[in-house]
Every structure is written in structure tokens, then in C-alpha cells.
């Protein structure tokens, strides 16, 4: 999935001249239904860093609130997935 999104973001960047960051997540069957998040970035700064690397508290400022939100979204499916494993 990550490679597919990166390819899409590259195409969008080429067409628009913009930079993009995509947050994605949900229950991961490979992790026993635990909520997993991914951040995919299309650009790097002058130092070769993506937005996630250039922003020192990216995880706490962006990924953690997104993960908290996903735990609300997938509350029931998350619990039922855990019961099955």
C-alpha cells in the first residue's frame, strides 16, 4: 500500500507542484488487530528530510492524535478482532 500511495503522491506532486503528506491507519490483522498508522510524504527539504523527519514532534503532534481518532473509529471492530486472536 505504501508504494502505491508514494507513486500517487509523486504523480500529484508532478502535476501540481505541491507537496503532500498522507496519514493512514486502522486495525492491522498482522498485529493482532492493533491500530497501526502510517505517514507518507511526497517531498524532502534541503536537508533530505521529509515533513515527518523535519518536524521533531511529528509523532506526538500528528500521529498520536490520528491514532487516538482511529481508536474511536474502529472501537468495535478493534475489540472483536482482539477477541478472535
Image (cartoon, rainbow, N blue to C red):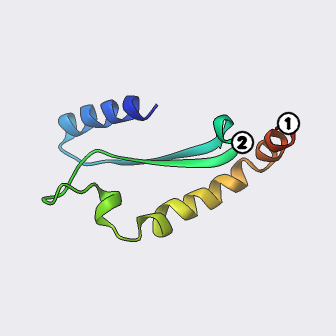
Residue at point 54% right, 49% down? 37
Location of residue 14 in the rendering, given as x and y in whole percent from the top left corner: 18, 35
Location of residue 82 in the rendering, given as x and y in whole percent from the top left corner: 81, 44
- Check the image and report above or below for 1 versus 26: above
- Check the image and report above or below for 10 versus 69: above
- Earlier along the polypeptide chain: callout 1 or callout 2? 2
- Check the image and report above or below for 6 versus 53: above
Please give left or right for residue 31 compared with residue 81 in the image: left
Q: Are marks 1 and 2 in contact (CB under 8 Å)?
A: yes
User: Which residue is identified by label 2?
Assistant: 33
Callout 2: SS:
loop
- Check the image and report above or below for 81 versus 62: above
Residue at point 72% right, 47% down? 74
11 or 48: nearer the viewer: 48
Please give left or right for residue 78 compared with residue 54 in the image: right
Callout 1: SS:
helix
Q: Residues within 10 Å of mark 2 (few under 14, many from 20)?
A: many
Residue at point 15% right, 60% down? 47
User: Which residue is identified by label 1?
Assistant: 84
Residue at point 22% right, 47% down? 18
> Quadrant where the C terminus lies?
top right
Location of residue 4 in the rendering, given as x and y in whole percent from the top left corner: 39, 28
58 or 21: nearer the viewer: 58
Measured in 3D between alpha carbons, the distance from the residue under mark 1 to the one under mark 2, in whole angstroms, is 9 Å
Please give left or right for residue 15 compared with residue 71 in the image: left
Amino acid at each position: 500500500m505504501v508504494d502505491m500511495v508514494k507513486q500517487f503522491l509523486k504523480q500529484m506532486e508532478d502535476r501540481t507542484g505541491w507537496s503532500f503528506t498522507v496519514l493512514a491507519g486502522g486495525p492491522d490483522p498482522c498485529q493482532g488487530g492493533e491500530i497501526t498508522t502510517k505517514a507518507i510524504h511526497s517531498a524532502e527539504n534541503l536537508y533530505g528530510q521529509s515533513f515527518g523527519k523535519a518536524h521533531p514532534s511529528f509523532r506526538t503532534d500528528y500521529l498520536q492524535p490520528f491514532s487516538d481518532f482511529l481508536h474511536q473509529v474502529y472501537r468495535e471492530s478493534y475489540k472483536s478482532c482482539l477477541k478472535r486472536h
